[in-house]
Amino acid sequence: MAGNEVAADRQAGLAAAAQWLDRFLLPLVLVCAGLGIALPGPGRRLDASGAIFITLAVLVFCTGASVTFADFRGLRTASRRMALMLAATTIVLPLLAWLASRLVSEPALQGGVLAAGVAPVEVASVALTGLAGGEVVVAAGLLISSTLLTVLFAGPLLGLLGAHSATSQIGLLATLALVVALPLIVGCAVRTIDPFGGRDRLLLEILGMASLLVLLWEIASELRLQASDVLVAAALLAYLAAAGVLGWLLALGAPMPRRTAIILPTAMRDFAVAAGIAASAFGVAAAAPLGIYGVMVLVFGAIVVYISKRR
């Protein structure tokens, strides 16, 4: 009897913590970003050891633990809209990034903005889709498909836009396998088998939100802001806004959970992959704007989650 009471108290505590994180997610996002910028030392030391990829893997695992393998059968009903979204983003986003890059005068920084346009779906957008009550399996399918498209087309597209080399296809696929595919499969397996009878779901929800906040702190810690970054930030913000409008247009007519699963992956592109593409195609200096972009997309995603939960 006492053991049941302890378990009940533990679940009540976890429920209260999850509710608190959910309620204050947006201000917590802003606080974590501010801490990373104001006190970057600890975050940079962690990032030097690859902590960003570990945090991303944890985030994807928690997201995977919200769906079962059977849920992926639902991709068939969304296949046409997914195909439209993938075709539109592959063609339109590079064009939008090129237009936004015209706001920046320095060639290397222009290249950083361009790289955001050919990057795949942001890994964290899958988790944010889940937090917003969207269709996680659709967002996960878009993530994997868009990454494969990036592997195939990022180099040729950037070549048309003036890049002098292509990004590493093997490195991109390895990142996809270790940071996305493996944690997602393990998370889905845990949810499908359900060894704890559902008692772990609140804990995984808390871990997912906490890892999102840690990820934002890590990204913000890498920023080295200068006066010249104002134009870069403006260009990236213009690109993000245009991508958000594209996502909204592509999601018209879809049920609300699917709309979220289209809007977030369309608007949020992977800043880490974009940084690697920028460095490979335009030189190391071109990767500098992508830290700013990473903070922007996570704040954007948190705002979408905040709005979705209050409808």
Image (tube, helix red, strand yellow):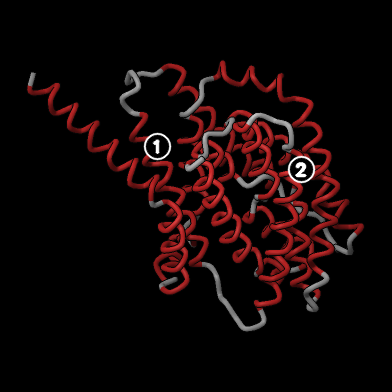
Mark 2: few/some/many CA within 10 Å (<14, 14-19, 20+): some
Q: Residue 292, position in %: x, y?
A: 60, 66
- Label 1 or label 2, whichever lies nearer to me, is 2
Label 2 amino acid? Leu
- The count of marks equals 2
Residue 204 locus on image (x, y percent): 38, 35
Q: Return the residue nearer the eye: 202 or 263.
A: 263
In the depicted structure, whether residue 269 falls above or below residue 32: above
Q: Is residue 224 left or right of residue 250?
A: left
Q: Quadrant of the N terminus?
A: top left
Left or right, 201 with respect to 14, comes to: right
Spatial CA distance of label 1 from label 2 is: 30 Å
Helix, strand, or loop for circle 1?
A: helix
x and y percentages locating residue 304 in the rendered image: 56, 48
Residue at horizontal 49%, vertical 57%?
216
Foreground of the two, 126 or 107: 126
Residue type at mark 1: give it. Answer: Glu
Q: Residue at x 81, y 34 (%)?
A: 84
Label 1 packing within 10 angstroms: few (<14), some (14-19), many (20+): many
| The furthest residue to the front | 311
Identify the residue at horizontal 64%, vertical 56% (top origin). 271
Q: Residue furthest bottom?
A: 227
State whether residue 290 is above or below residue 269.
Answer: below
Residue at x 71% of width, y 19% of height: 76
Q: Residue 284, image x and y in percent?
A: 70, 69
Quarter of the image where one finds residue 82: top right
Mark earlier in primary sequence (1, 2): 1
**Disc sitting over residue 249 in the figure:** 2
Q: Quick one: SS at disc 2?
A: helix
Instruction: Look at mark 1 in the image and give the residue it sits on.
Output: 205
On screen, 161 above or below 2? below
